[in-house]
Amino acid sequence: MTELVEEKTDEETRPEPPRKRRNPAPRILAVITGLLVVYYVVLTLSGTLNSTTEVSITGQQEAVGEDYLTLQMKTQDVDLTNRVMEATVLPIPHGEFVGERAGEMSQNLRIQIVSGGQTTSVVTYPGESILDPTTVTLGLDRGDTFYPWDRPFANFRVSVQNDETGTDVPFELAIENSARPWVLAASVGASEIRGGVTALPVTLDGNRDPLSVTLVVFYLLAILLTTLMAVVTVGSALLKKKLEFSNVIWLSATMLSFPALRSAMPGAPPIGTALDFTVLFPCICIVAGILVWAGVHLLWRESKPLRSRELEEDPEGEMTNET
């Protein structure tokens, strides 16, 4: 009987073999690899990597025959703060407008652009001269209030005349976009005759590319999550009476980092957009309020020995305050 009990005791005291757990790392790696493959396939098929600078133009342009100009307009910059768009204009001659030398115009030209109800740019090219791109300014009808989802557009009219005779010169419009990170689309209407001049009405619509909007959303989420972490972390430390000076330092650094993070957003305009009033300012105020609350609480707690009139020495030789 005794031997049976001893054997049983040995079996009970024998250590159990280690249990095997399934390693989740291969599954996580496979999921991440699959997501990356899907992302790059979508990126390739969407044509974002091979994006062209040519702006699509909707609307019917009138037939120009064999003797005409190709008015090549290339956007350079979109300034939402001042509500202007910078572009260059270069006429390319065809037929009888081609000069004797390469890149030469045979006639005197006058290109007029009316934007915002007033003539903003007048470009003249003397006959028998080499053509060079000329910078023009277009007025925008919307600013940067709704950054990064702002949709500025420019309405303008283009006319080309012979600078000597004043007769209209037939032309077609071609637009290229070099203003990053903007995506532009153009539409033309039927030609209008105003003051004896035939002008082509054009509308340019713009919006930020998806990558810029995604990055701005990521920055906004970072600001919101950091603010939420500040509320939870400091609130929990106060309730558990474990608030430390490092928490106050972290709150100060967080409050000061929000404006820097906002300035790092792609194409960030000056302070004062709808994004600032809805996200940035409230988050800064929340963190600043928590900072003041935690700072006053910590200051009151740590200054207790200085506010006490008497100090009591414990058996270990340490001084404690006595109220």
Image (spheres, rainbow, N blue to C red):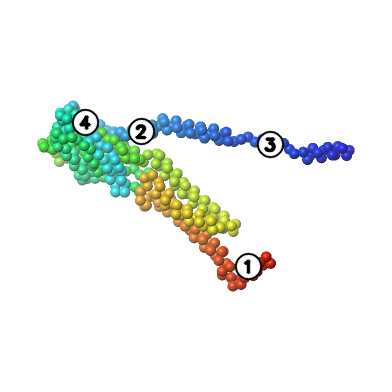
Tell me the mark number nearer the camera, choosing from 4 and 3.
3
Identify the image quadrant of residue 193.
top left
Numbered badge on residue 51: 2
The CA span between labels 4 and 3 is 80 Å
Is residue 179 at least partly visible in the picture? yes
Callout 1 secondary element = strand
Disc 3 target residue: 19
- Distance, label 3 to label 2, CA atoms, is 55 Å
Alpha-carbon span between mark 2 and mark 4: 28 Å
**Which residue type does callout 2 highlight?**
Ser
Q: Which residue is mark 4?
A: 62
Query: Type of residue at label 4?
Result: Glu
Distance from the alpha carbon under mark 1 to that under mark 2: 73 Å
Q: Residues within 10 Å of mark 1 (few under 14, many from 20)?
A: few
30 vs 271, left or right, is right
Q: Which disc is residue 319 wearing?
A: 1
- Element assignment for label 2: loop
Q: Amino acid at mark 3?
A: Arg
From this view, report whether residue 170 is shown above or below residue 154: above
